[in-house]
Every structure is written in C-alpha cells, then in structure tokens.
C-alpha cells in the first residue's frame, strides 16, 4: 500500500462490519500496529494485528470501553442511509456524542469522521460548492452528519480534538449511474484520504469532500489542501459504460436537480 504511514499504535475503526468498514479493514492495518475493529454486528475472528470489540454506539458505556486505549479513531459507524428519525437519533447523533465524550476522556487527539455529501444535498448539480458553504441537508441522515460536523468543531474548540469531517460521495467498486460520475470515491482513494487525515502534521477541524479525481465535480476541495490528499483514481474510465447502460436524466426530477440525488425525496416524511 503506497504512501501508508504507521502513524498510530492502536487505531479504532468503527462500523467495521459495514460496506466501507469491510473495504478498509485490510487497508488500515498499514496505518497502525494494532487495528481495533468495532461494530454491533459480528466481525468474525480477529486476524493478525487486529482486535475486535462489539459495541452499540448508543451505549455510552460500550463506546467508552471501545475507545479506551486507542490513539486515533476512524469513525465509519452508524446508519448510512435515510431512516426514521428515532433510529438516526440513536445511532448517528447520540452515537457521535458518545464517541467524542469517550475520545475526550481517553485523550484521543485525532478523529476521521465519516460525514456525507448529504450534508449539502440540497445544492443543485449545476453549482460548485466548497467547505464554507452552509449546510443544506437532504434528510434526517444528512442532518445527523451536519450535527456530527458541528459536534466535532465543538470538541476541537473546547478540547483540542482534531477532526477531519470527510463528506464521502459514493464509495463503491465503480460508479453505478451518471450521478456517481461526479461523486465517486474509489476504495483506494478513500484509504489515501484517511491516511492523509491521520498523518498531516496539523489537521485542526477540517471539512474534506471525499471524491476521486473525477472530471465532473460539484465540490471544491481547495480549503482542505493542508490535509495533503491527492486522489489517484477517476470515474472517467467508467463514463462510456455508465452512459451505455443508463438513460438521460429527467431534468424535472428533484433527484437530477439536486446534488443529493434520490436522497432528496427518500425517507419517511
């Protein structure tokens, strides 16, 4: 794994049983001596260089035990789709609070927080935005991630815990549709981004858009250059195949108007 630095002794990966957690499990071993994996779902047997801890993010006691002894956190845990507010509240809002409280108590100084492009989902696809644009969440999920970004800022200002709020676009093996030609983030670029966030000398509270080097983009990452992330993959190699298997967008459809895509009309409300 190129450009991977062992920056921490024990690194915690939450949400390790999820899609991105699974993709990162092997990759992140290069960033630490011990990778602690956590989820409320089963993780299987710990492999060499791993520890496994089962924890529900809504339980302060379980999160406290999960964080104890760790030097940095890659927080991928929680609900990653639109859902009823009661579920989002426990997993993503209470869960984020529990994580930062545990980080404060145990002296963790750096967090990579999996935020989302859905924090700004109600900007139009005809716009290009940067980290200083106000949040415009497209649902309860995006709202919870906006809360997480503000929570991270509070814990930086009050307690000096540095956080990279990574607004992940669409991280899959390849783009699934035309929207993802703008939002796609390869698994390897996701790992490169996390490595940059863990190793940059001064992180502060930073908002970084998680995207590969795509020709079409709605996000300007210039305010995060101090993080040092350089994407090496691009959605452009998939463009011809994506166009061949998909139809032109209906420009009267909110999913084609707004950056959040289908999330702008998903959910229980």
Image: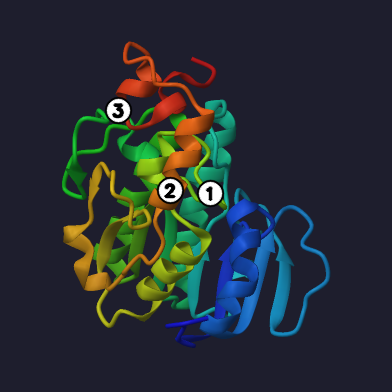
What secondary structure is marked by label 3? loop
**Of the numbered discs in the image, which one, if any, rests on residue 122?**
3
Question: Where does the image place residue 29, in percent across and percent down from the top left?
Answer: 60, 80
256 over 198 or under it: above or below: above
Q: Nearer the viewer, mark 3 or mark 2?
A: 2
**Pointer 2: what residue?**
184
| Residue 199 position (above or below residue 103) | below
The residue at the point 33 percent across, 11 percent down is 252
Q: Residue at x 46, y 22 (%)?
A: 247
The answer to whether mark 2 and mark 1 are in CB contact below 8 A is yes
Question: Label 3: how many residues lie within 10 Å, few (<14), some (14-19) or many (20+)?
Answer: many
Side of 88 where 129 appears, left or right: left
Q: Residue 259 lies in what quarter of the image?
A: top left
Callout count: 3
Secondary structure at numbered mark 2: loop
Question: Eyeballing the image, is 105 above or below 95?
Answer: below
Residue 223 position, x and y percent, is: 17, 60
User: First in sequence: mark 2 or mark 1?
Assistant: 1
Alpha-carbon span between mark 3 and mark 2? 18 Å
> Rounded to the nearest whole Å, what is the CA distance between mark 2 and mark 1?
7 Å
Q: Position of residue 256 (x, y in %)?
A: 36, 22
Q: Secondary structure at mark 1?
A: loop
Residue 174, numbered label: 1
Q: Which one is earlier in the sequence, the residue at label 1 or at label 3?
A: 3
Query: What is the CA distance from the residue labelled 1 to the residue labelled 3?
Result: 24 Å
């Amino acid at each position: 794994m190129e450009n991977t630095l062992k920056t921490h002794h024990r690194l915690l990966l939450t949400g390790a049983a999820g899609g991105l957690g699974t993709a990162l499990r092997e990759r992140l071993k290069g960033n630490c001596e011990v990778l602690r994996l956590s989820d409320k779902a089963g993780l299987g047997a710990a492999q060499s260089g791993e520890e496994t801890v089962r924890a529900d993010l809504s339980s302060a006691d379980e999160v406290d035990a999960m964080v104890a002894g760790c030097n940095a956190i890659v927080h991928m845990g929680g609900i990653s789709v639109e859902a009823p507010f009661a579920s989002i509240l426990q997993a993503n809002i209470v869960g984020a609070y529990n994580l930062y409280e545990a980080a404060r108590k145990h002296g963790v100084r750096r967090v990579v927080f999996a935020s989302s492009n859905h924090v700004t989902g109600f900007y139009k696809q005809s716009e290009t935005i940067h980290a200083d644009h106000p949040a415009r969440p497209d649902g309860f999920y995006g709202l919870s991630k906006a809360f997480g970004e503000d929570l991270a800022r509070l814990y930086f200002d009050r307690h000096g815990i540095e956080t990279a709020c990574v607004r992940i676009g669409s991280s899959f093996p390849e783009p699934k549709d035309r929207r993802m030609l703008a939002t796609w983030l390869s698994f390897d670029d996701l790992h490169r981004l996390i490595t940059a966030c863990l190793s940059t000398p001064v992180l502060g509270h930073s908002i970084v858009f998680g995207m590969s080097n795509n020709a079409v983009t709605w996000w300007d990452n210039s305010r995060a250059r101090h993080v040092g992330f350089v994407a090496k993959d691009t959605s452009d190699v998939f463009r011809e195949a994506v166009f061949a298997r998909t139809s032109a967008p209906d420009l009267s459809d909110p999913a084609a108007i707004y950056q959040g895509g289908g999330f702008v009309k998903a959910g229980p409300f």
